[in-house]
Image: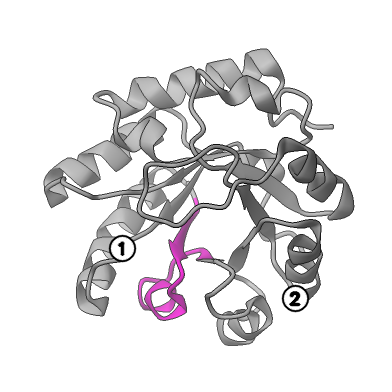
Amino acid sequence: MERVRREQMKLYLVTDSTNLTEEEFLHKVEDALKGGVTFLQIREKERSTLEYIELAKKVHEISGRYNVPMVVDDRVDVAMAVDAEGVHLGQSDMPVDIARKILGNEKIIGATAKTVEQAKKARQMGADYLGVGAIYPTTTKVKTIITSVDTLKNICNEVDICVNAIGGLNKDNIDVLKDAPVSGICVVSAIMKSQDPCLAAKELLEKMSELGIGKKV
């Protein structure tokens, strides 16, 4: 059952609302979608459950207008509360197979993997796609362990689901992914910290096309 298509994974935005008002944050998210973001993950580590739900509802309403899937980072309960398209789970979050039992077969479940073993396990448990990295050190608050491009390529070759590279990626350094058969890239700061998220998304997609990143292989 195909819950997520490869072309939907091309430019995957993970949100970051740090130091932004709600209005500024929602405006940035919408601008990024106007620029061509194809998949969205809302990530809020610091908010209460109620605050998370209220913000996720607003983001989901925007993503729905652009027909872009939205998944919720970590929180299966929040994903269910706002009827998001799914959830993204890290290595220390709820196991993929348990999340699948709770969410059912219709919802998208993504997983973070840093090794071939983790990737295979996530796939066996029912993950629909993988976020693999960090390729570069990141400026987000998430703890990062660097994953080599060779490991990324090995993961792409070992699993039959979408694999996206994540971690410190921007238009000036994604050439490192030129020969990697990834479905796309995940970015945070490259768009969220841009003064013009719409232009930032367009430039990323343009550079990806030049390098052949995310093309069907």
**Picture residue at 41% right of the left edge, 81% below the top:** 77
Estimate how packed mark 2 is, as few (under 14), some (14 to 19) or many (20 or more) residues with alpha carbons within 10 Å.
some
What number is the disc on residue 178? Answer: none
- The span picked out in magenta is 69-87
Residue 173 colored in magenta in the image? no
Residue 211 visible in the displayed image: yes
For residue 75, above or below residue 9: below
Instruction: Give the left or right position of residue 75, taking residue 44 as reference.
Output: right
The residue shown at (79%, 38%) is 150
The residue that label 1 is drawn on is: 56
Q: In the rendered view of the protein, which quadrant contains the C terminus? A: top right
Q: Amino acid at mark 1?
A: Ala
The structure residue drawn at horizontal position 21% and vertical position 39%, both measured from the top left corner, is 27
Label 2 is placed on what type of residue? Met
In this figure, which residue is indicated by the disc labeled 2?
125
Q: Quadrant of the N terminus?
A: bottom right
